[in-house]
Amino acid sequence: VTAIANGTAEIHAKSEGVKSNTIVFSVGASTVRTGTFVSAGGYQSSGSVTVSEVTNGVQVQLSANFSASIAAGTFIYLANSTNGANVKSSGLELGQYTPTGTKTFITSQATLQQYQYVVVLCKPFGITFGYAQLTP
């Protein structure tokens, strides 16, 4: 793949009617990534998220219309998987989520391109309630 301008491209392979997973390539400096939440595991999650560069880290901002199922110990994570056990063990915990609590999380422990997903996780049981895949 050779870039000819700044932007993004989605690339996949296809053989005998079988399509591979898509890989997203980004060229140029982006300071914002966004995603739309989808529900998982029979639980509810909806709305959008914006992840942006801030001084010394990133800010994760859940939209005003964000909502998710709530249980004891519902947390927001940055992760490279949507599997609850993987998120719990290798994701970056941003903080607990409650409907009336904060919807903005700031961390100095991540870079903008480091993680692929924002995940809503029931931490005690390692269950993913929903996730948003981040795009440039």
Image (tube, grey):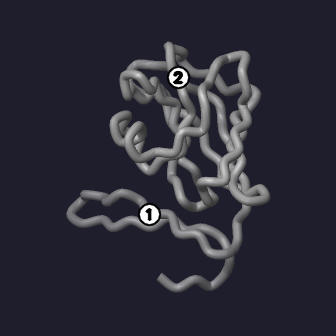
The answer to whether any part of residue 16 appears in the image is yes
Q: In which quarter of the view is residue 35 placed?
A: top right
Q: Could you tell me residue 29's position as x and y percent?
A: 70, 71
Specify the amino acid type for callout 1: Ile
Left/right placement of residue 25 relative to residue 33 reads: left
Decide: is 81 above or below 30. Answer: above
Q: Position of residue 129 (x, y in %)?
A: 46, 25
Query: Viewer-proximal residue, 74 or 65?
Result: 74
- x, y percentage for residue 72? 50, 14
The residue at the point 54 percent across, 39 percent down is 93
Q: Is residue 54 left or right of residue 45?
A: right
SS at circle 1: strand
Which residue is drawn at the image coordinates 45% and 24% (left, top)?
122
First in sequence: mark 2 vs mark 1:
1
| Of labels 2 and 1, the one closer to you | 2
The kind of residue on which mark 2 rests is: Thr
Q: Is residue 3 above or below residue 113?
A: below
Q: Is residue 135 left or right of residue 22?
A: right
Looking at the image, the residue that sits furthest to the left is 16
> What is the crowding at mark 2: few (fewer than 14 residues within 10 Å), some, or many (at least 20)?
many
Which residue is the site of mark 2?
A: 74
Distance between the alpha carbons at the discs numbered 2 and 1 = 30 Å
The residue that mark 1 highlights is: 23
User: Residue 117: where, in percent of width, then height?
Assistant: 52, 46
